[in-house]
Image: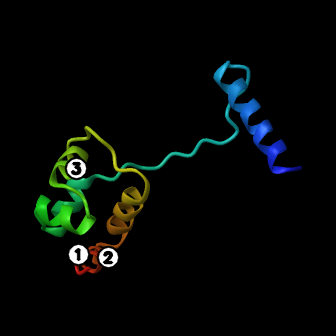
Amino acid sequence: MSIFDELQTSLQEAVEIKQGKAQASRITRHELADVKAIRAKLHVSQAEFAEAMGTSVDTIKSWETKRRNPTGLAAKVLATIQDNPAFFNELASH
């Protein structure tokens, strides 16, 4: 099957799902990081956390109040910090 055929099949499946004619064969969900809890466990300020994450204090505040959710690389980094808090020190040193 060519890439075009795969894309065409995928697009048709998406249309059928949207129209309610089919159900998604795979749903991926990721647990949202509790940024405030992660930061509290590390005993760092919002400013320190923002600097290490390479983002603004306002973004950290938005994540902590659940107005916005971390996505992409930020979500992966937060998951890594949650699983391995020592990684934060490595991140903050750069």
Of labels 1 and 2, the one closer to you:
1
Q: Residues within 10 Å of mark 2 (few under 14, many from 20)?
A: some
User: In which quadrant of the rendered image does the C terminus lie?
Assistant: bottom left
Element assignment for label 1: helix
Alpha-carbon distance for marks 3 and 1?
Answer: 17 Å
**Extreme-front residue of the structure:** 4
Q: Is residue 38 above or below residue 1?
A: below
Element assignment for label 3: helix
- The amino acid sitting under disc 1 is Ala
Alpha-carbon distance for marks 3 and 2?
Answer: 20 Å
Identify which residue, 39 or 93, lies in the foreground.
93
Q: Which mark is residue 10?
A: none
Q: Where residue 76 sits: x, y (%)?
A: 42, 61
In this rendering, would 23 be left or right of 60? right
Which residue is painted at 33% across and 53% down in the image?
Answer: 33
Identify which residue, 2 or 22, lies in the foreground.
2
Residue corresponding to mark 2: 87
Q: Is residue 46 above or below residue 20?
A: below
Q: Is residue 89 above or below residue 8?
A: below
Q: Earlier in the sequence, mark 3 or mark 2?
A: 3
Element assignment for label 2: helix
Q: Are marks 3 and 1 in contact (CB under 8 Å)?
A: no
Q: Earlier in the sequence, mark 3 or mark 1?
A: 3
Q: Earlier in the sequence, mark 1 or mark 2?
A: 2
Residue corresponding to mark 3: 59
In this rendering, would 59 be left or right of 3? left
Which residue is painted at 80% across and 37% down in the image?
Answer: 9
In this rendering, would 20 be left or right of 81? right
Q: Is residue 63 above or below residue 12?
A: below
Which residue is painted at 42% across and 49% down in the image?
Answer: 31
Q: Which mark is residue 92?
A: 1
- The amino acid sitting under disc 2 is Phe
